[in-house]
Image (cartoon, rainbow, N blue to C red):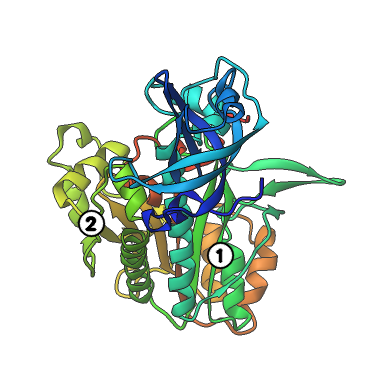
Amino acid sequence: MKRTHYSKDIKPEMNGDTVVINGWVHEIRDFGGLAFLIVRDREGLMQVTMPKKKVPKEVVDKLKGLSRESVVSVTAAVKAEAKAPSGFELIPSCIEVLSLADSPLPLDPTGKVPAELDTRLDARFIDIRSPEVTAVFIIRSNMIKAVRDYLCSQGCLEIATPKIVATATEGGTALFPISYFEREAFLNQSPQLYKQMMMAAGMDRVYEIGPIFRAEEHATRKHLNEATSIDVELSFATHEDAMELLENTIAYVYQYVKDNCEKQLKLLNIDLQVPKTPFKRLKYKEAMDIIKNDPECAELDYGDDLTTQAENYLGQAIGEHYFIVDWPTGIRAFYSQSCDSDPSVCKAFDLMHPRMELSSGAQREHRHDELVMNLEARDLNPESFKFYLDAFRFGMPPHAGWGLGAERLLQTMLNLNNVREAVLFPRDRVRLTP
């Protein structure tokens, strides 16, 4: 039963070698004197060929009553075969049934019988067995690795911040309250306040990849209530420095996935194009001027946030990754720093894919008194943010940063229809299981 090879490790040049493979019964084909057992593991499919006159009867008999998606271990000889899908086939000497699957299956992991997304998510453990779905999560793993590799190469230290907090990151009510012994606490919306505190701590350049929680009653293809955020904060940096790091991170991740996930991209029929840097900078006012050409966005005024329709219209007009910069101060978070020349505009930015927003960031207000005034202007009590404000009283360098949605990055990279397809077990307004 001890595996010697994954499917990707077996090559036609191994002709005559004995291997042990483990996996799931993807398909059984019996043509009388010849039978095929297609076994699937994480890396792909393997064809086990059984000429019934050459394979021991007890091995062939294992096919009787063997259901699809049962788990098997197969000891077999590699035989080079140009007509086989991978250039080889396996001639078995032993088949061990490790777990017999019930019938009928909740859904068909081969994809021959399509299933609605809700059905797929209800039986996610079987849905992920589909080679195409597995490919999505292999790419996701490589995507996260690429983010870590690149940010580490740029001198960023990985940190971990609390997910149970006493107050909201940005104020507001989009919080999940929890019982924390004798008092109320909340699941954190963002590591924002803590990564800024690390700037006061002298850690200089940090990043975190972790869960965030937002109690917003969305029911869209791009929103989740539990998501993975890639957060970065840089000391002695401006918003331009932060944008440069962000666009270079995106380009690096695309190139890494293109170079290391060729098989998975081919399976998903994706010709991945690496975005060219630097990305276009579009001022908020310029964006609003473009949006006004869409009759469906006629009600939007300067100072409004962008609707989904507005994002879609802009995306079609721009056609590539781009930044929206110079946002009105009043609609951005209290910690965004205003421009000295025009305090009504702040040094905030959003990174946009033609389909949707991917990231939000800004140069931060690092002066204590200005932060207090910003909180008060938004009817937030500075006392509730004392633990955060204290970090600004004893030497805080200028700093900037951003948060990037991992699921949206994957969704747009792979052109997935719904962000839930980019999550193993999504949590949204109605889904709490599995």
Say whether residue 413 is visible: no
Up-down relation of residue 97 to residue 280 (above or below): above
For the residue marked with disc 1, what is the amino acid?
Glu
Specify the label residue 367 is tagged with.
none
How many numbered discs?
2
Q: Nearer the viewer, residue 203 or 45?
A: 45
Going by the numbered disc 2, the residue's amino acid type is: Gln
* Nearer to me, 407 or 190: 407
Decide: marks 1, 2 in contact (CB < 8 A)? no
CA separation, marks 1 and 2?
Answer: 27 Å
Q: Quadrant of residue 327?
A: bottom left
- Using the image, determine if residue 211 lies above or below residue 66: below
Residue at 39% over, 27% down = 111
**Viewer-proximal residue, 280 or 23?**
23
- From this viewpoint, which residue is outermost toward the front? 53
Secondary structure type for disc 1: strand
**Nearer-the-camera pick, 240 or 58:** 58
Return the x and y of residue 385 as percentages of the image width and height. Answer: 65, 62
Residue at 56% across / 70% down in the picture? Answer: 196
User: Above or below — where is 220 with respect to 274?
Assistant: above
The crowd level at tag 2 (other Cα within 10 Å; few <14, some 14-19, many 20+) is: few
**On-image quarter of the C terminus:** top right
Residue identified by numbered label 1: 208
Specify the farthest residue to the top.
104
Q: Which residue is mark 2?
A: 273
The N terminus: image quadrant: top right
